[in-house]
């Protein structure tokens, strides 16, 4: 008896029963139109015929044939997926994964778990979908394929980004860490960028400031200096929204060491912005934040610029100027006042 099992020879009528024909494209499992429902029914009948055959044991077969079982589960899963029967496709992929695990084929098991997660995504069961995809990524890591693990985590983040941003941030940061460990810095910084934007969108500004600093450091490592300038602008906007002028000014000073920053329009705009913010000049701050340099940044950072308000209600500070005539006229009756003014004329220090 050969290894595993094989189906008996089928007549053309039998093949027509088990397979759905694609008009003009030969045999295939992807039905169209009215044939989709028929293919789903046939796929279900086919699965009842073959599921478990490889797992049966007998007098001459002491161990289940997990390899053949996984192959048949995979075929059934594809049939259900093409027929839009996602619940049954998920079950088939899940059983395929278990069969691969029993056969110690962990990479293929991870692929099947990932596909099962994507079927759950189609069923709008996002929580369980993320769990399965994360499980797949861990198996990829254990199997020595970290790149595939990072891609799976990125896919999971996209699945849940609009539903649970906090979870998506965690997934993107995990993805970035995997890429960074593999010294794939360009992919890592892209993932940190996704996390930073979601942190800003969720008003988690303290964490966003840390994430942006990480981004800027990686861009500096790969010598992408113009993007470092943009990240400095984003950092300054985040710090000013945190009401931390000192940290914003420190960001600009530290960026002077980046080649070309001092001579860039980014540096000039940031110095003008900090000057207006320090003097509580809302007009100057708004003018800078409405410039094309700020407006055409990523949408989340552009919104920070447009909503930036100076402290103190936006009233510009002006040093009081006393007319010379009034000063001379009031000198005689207010001599004590003039003495007090002279005492503090040089300031408190």
Image (cartoon, rainbow, N blue to C red):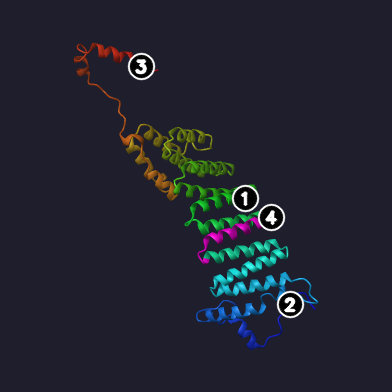
Give the Cα distance between marks 2 and 4: 31 Å
**What is the spatial separation of the Cα atoms under label 2 and label 3, in whole angstroms?**
98 Å
Image height of 13 relative to 259, above or below: below
Name the residue carrying label 4: 142
Image quarter for residue 218?
A: top right
Q: CA distance from mark 1 to mark 2?
A: 41 Å
Which residue position is annotated with label 2?
5
Q: Which residues are magenta?
A: 122-145
Q: Is residue 189 visible?
A: yes
Can residue 297 be seen here? The reply is no
What element does badge 4 sit on? helix
1 or 4: mark nearer the eye = 4
Task: Return the residue at label 3.
Answer: 346
Q: Is residue 56 left or right of residue 29?
A: right
Rendering coords of residue 321 (x, y %): 26, 23
Judged from the image, the secondary structure of the residue bearing numbered disc 2 is: loop
Task: Find residue 175 and report its horizontal and vertical position in percent.
Answer: 59, 52
* 1 vs 2, front mark: 2
Closer to the observer: label 2 or label 3? 2
Which type of secondary structure does the marked residue at label 3 adopt?
Answer: loop
Q: Position of residue 249 (x, y in %)?
A: 45, 33
Q: Which residue is mark 1?
A: 178
Q: Tell me if label 1 and label 2 are in contact, CB under 8 Å.
A: no
Q: Residues within 10 Å of mark 1 (few under 14, many from 20)?
A: many
- Which of disc 3 and disc 1 is earlier in sequence? 1
Task: Using the numbered discs, state the Cα–Cα distance from disc 1 to disc 3 in whole angstroms.
Answer: 58 Å
Percent across and percent down for residue 251 are 49, 36
For the point 52% across and 49% down, which residue is it? 195
């Amino acid at each position: 008896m050969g290894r595993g099992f094989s189906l008996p020879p089928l007549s053309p009528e039998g093949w027509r029963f088990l397979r759905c024909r694609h008009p003009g494209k030969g045999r295939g499992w992807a039905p169209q139109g009215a044939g989709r429902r028929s293919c789903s029914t046939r796929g279900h009948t086919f699965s009842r015929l073959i599921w478990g055959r490889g797992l049966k044991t007998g007098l001459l077969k002491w161990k289940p044939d997990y390899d053949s079982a996984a192959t048949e589960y995979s075929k059934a899963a594809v049939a259900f997926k093409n027929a839009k029967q996602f619940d049954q496709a998920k079950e088939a992929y899940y059983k395929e994964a278990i069969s691969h695990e029993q056969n110690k084929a962990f990479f293929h098991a991870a692929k099947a778990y990932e596909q099962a997660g994507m079927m759950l995504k189609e069923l709008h069961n996002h929580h369980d979908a993320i769990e399965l995809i994360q499980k797949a990524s861990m198996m990829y890591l254990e199997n020595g394929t970290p790149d595939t693990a990072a891609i799976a985590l990125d896919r999971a983040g996209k699945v849940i980004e609009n539903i649970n941003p906090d979870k998506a941030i965690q997934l993107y940061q995990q993805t970035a860490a995997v890429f960074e460990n593999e010294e794939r810095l360009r992919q890592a910084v892209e993932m940190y960028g996704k996390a930073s934007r979601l942190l800003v969108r969720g008003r988690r500004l303290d964490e966003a400031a840390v994430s942006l600093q990480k981004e800027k450091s990686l861009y500096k490592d790969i010598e992408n200096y113009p993007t470092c300038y943009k990240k400095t602008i984003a950092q300054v906007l985040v710090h000013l929204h945190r009401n931390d002028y000192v940290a914003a000014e420190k960001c600009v000073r530290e960026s002077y060491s980046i080649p070309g920053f001092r001579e860039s329009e980014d540096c000039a705009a940031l110095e003008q912005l900090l000057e207006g913010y320090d003097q509580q000049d809302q007009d100057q701050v708004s003018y800078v934040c409405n410039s094309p340099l700020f407006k055409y940044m990523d949408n989340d950072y552009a919104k920070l610029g447009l909503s930036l308000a100076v402290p103190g209600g936006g009233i510009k500070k002006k040093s009081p100027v006393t007319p010379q005539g009034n000063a001379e006229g009031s000198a005689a009756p207010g001599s004590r006042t003039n003495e007090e003014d002279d005492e503090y004329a040089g300031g408190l220090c």
